[in-house]
Image (cartoon, rainbow, N blue to C red):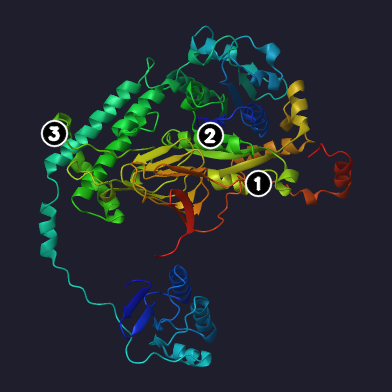
Amino acid sequence: MSGRVIVITSGKGGVGKTTASANLGVAIAATGVSVVLVDMDIGLRNLDILMGLENRVVYNLVDVIEERCKLRQALVKDKRHPNLSLLPAAQTRDKTAVTSDQMRDLCEELKKIFDFVVIDSPAGIETGFQNAVAGADEAIVVCTPEMSSVRDADRIIGLLEARKDEIEQYRLVINRYRPNMVQANDMMSVDDVLEILSVQLLGIVPEDEEIIISTNKGEPVSGTDNTRSGLAFRNIARRIRGEDVPLMDFDAGSQSWINRLVNFFNPARV
Amino acid sequence: MSKIAIISQPNEGVLLDVSGCSDLKEALEYLSSTLQASNSFWSGLNVSINVGKLSLKPSEVAQILAIAKGVGISPAGVYTTDSDTISSLEDNGVSLGKGAPMALPEVSLNTSSIEAAESDEPEEGKVQSAVSSIKVRVRDAFQAKRGPEGGQLDGDDDDDLLQDRLEGVDLATEDIRQNEKRIRKTIVKRKIHITGEFPAAEAAETSGKAMKVMDEEEEEIEEAEEDEIELDTETVETDEEEQEEDLEDEESPAASNTTMYLRQTLRSGQTISHKGHLIIIGDVNPGAEVMAEGDITIWGSLRGIAHAGIGGNTDAEIRALNLQPIQIRIAHAIARAPDKPRWKYKASHGPETARLVADKIRVFRSRIE
């Protein structure tokens, strides 16, 4: 049984593709299957930093494609999760270093070894994006509930629709969601986003300061138990694996009285 | 047998015939949608209703009467062939229709006249050469756009796109290789239309047959030269099954007799431009652009940019079920949406039409003239 190749893309930069890739990789690996994370942001690699593995990178994706090393030599095993590996990008090259056909072949090879291949796409719609989706079977579009992000996601979905025969399904993750702002009508709600994008919703990840902390520490939040965003990513991972998980309750009013008291004194938390 | 028929005769008033509906729910649906589409039309008319063999309880008759009352109709009589319904009508104080209900007029078609019309259509040769001209232009445009690496575009192509637009062929998609298959099917659809197999449903069914014909004639098409007939309609990333276009004849340049009919949603970054009327069944998302020489009709939400009457036609209109555009342009005039929360995308005012009135774009709630 060959693996599933999922590309995580968005169009707009900074919405949380790399964060989502790292966290979903960890969460899917925690369900018991083997996962490889592929960083396609050649020249501006970040996935190794988020995973905390930047010290262990010896070879990278471009070395594999140009056959300076074997695939196994380039894969970095994660320090906390035994069935998770990382294929880092090159920092000193740029996106023209690989072509779509080379990516397709690489994904075919990876599919044979791993159950899940999670590809972190760079921002934009040009070569970087095209290379990232070349080998993929499924796509996850990440967007934040903002006009600019939604418009770029719409563009990306249009491009994914045009590749109907390669990309079998694409679903949406809404990232950095702030229920308080939505209730105050200052932010687009889930319905507003879906009204334009009209795609299947995979999950919603709330805004969480823990993400910033986790990036700097190199420990994705979905590996630890005590964060809302971590729980959201774990739920999304379960949905990717086919489980039917209900959406988290984002109603701000449903918080316990202690939380509401804390929020009253410390409104920075969501 | 249609689900609802509106039959009117002088001195007899109007009959709303829902006897083709299979149950009360259907009848109510059709009644409400038909009546409410033009509610000022009905008041003052002598209206009767025919429910046929539907068996209705008193409460169900009351529902029908409520819908009628909502548009100002007090039915002069209700026709029915079911005894339970008769007693329900009595309970509601509605009189039975007198005599027999009006029926749709008998129509007999002279099929010989249809055959004669077919021979007036453009000959096969013209269709084939039009087909080849599209293929040649697509291929040329693809060659022009192919970068050194092959098949990749970057921002320098704006000039090429503009030039193509001026020539009337705007290949709005950036990866033309993926569109060739789609364009072949488009050509097939065009062929179907020429031989008169409208409407849309029939065309979709016969497309399989026509594809085989297409393959046989492919050799001839490859060799046919470019002819005077230019195809001025554009293609876009579309759902293959659902696109139909008319053939624009060079001899009759009037734009209004060709209409592009598209059944899909336009996403951000997609553009359509057509020299004629344009109908889109679907939404136009923000970031998408729609341009036409004639009217633009969107059966959905317009949230992008629409430009009607681009040839200078100030009579052009833009209409949509939900008009929330970024900009509306008719001929030379531009209007923008009022400043308010921009992301409230749910439908607000219902169907609206934008027209040019004394050089300004005004928006009207849709009504029947």
**Image position, residue A196 (x, y; %):** 54, 45
**Image position, residue B323 (x, y; %):** 50, 51
Q: Residues within 10 Å of mark 2 (few under 14, many from 20)?
A: many
Q: Are marks 2 and 3 in contact (CB under 8 Å)?
A: no
Q: Which residue is mark 3?
A: B220
Depth order, front residue of B321/B55: B321
Amino acid type assigned to the residue bearing label 3 in the image? Glu
What whole-number distance in Å separates the C-alpha atoms at marks 1 and 3?
56 Å
Amino acid type assigned to the residue bearing label 1 in the image? Ser
Disc number for residue A189: 1
Amino acid type assigned to the residue bearing label 2 in the image? Ala
Say if residue A199 shows up in the picture: no
Q: Residue at x 32, y 31 (%)?
A: B166
Q: Looking at the figure, which quarter contains the C terminus of chain B?
A: bottom left
Q: Which mark is in front, 1 or 2?
A: 1
- Element type where label 1 sits in the image: loop
Q: Which residue is mark 2?
A: A139
Q: Quadrant of residue A47?
A: top right
Q: Residue at x 60, y 24 (%)?
A: A37
Q: Quadrant of residue B134?
A: top left
Chain identity of mark 1:
A
Depth order, front residue of A37/B311: B311
What whole-number distance in Å separates the C-alpha atoms at marks 1 and 2?
22 Å
Q: Residue at x 43, y 73 (%)?
A: B41
Q: Residues within 10 Å of mark 3 (few under 14, many from 20)?
A: some
- Element type where label 2 sits in the image: strand
- Element type where label 3 sits in the image: helix
Whether labels 1 and 3 share one chain: no
In-image side of B238 versus A17 (left or right): left
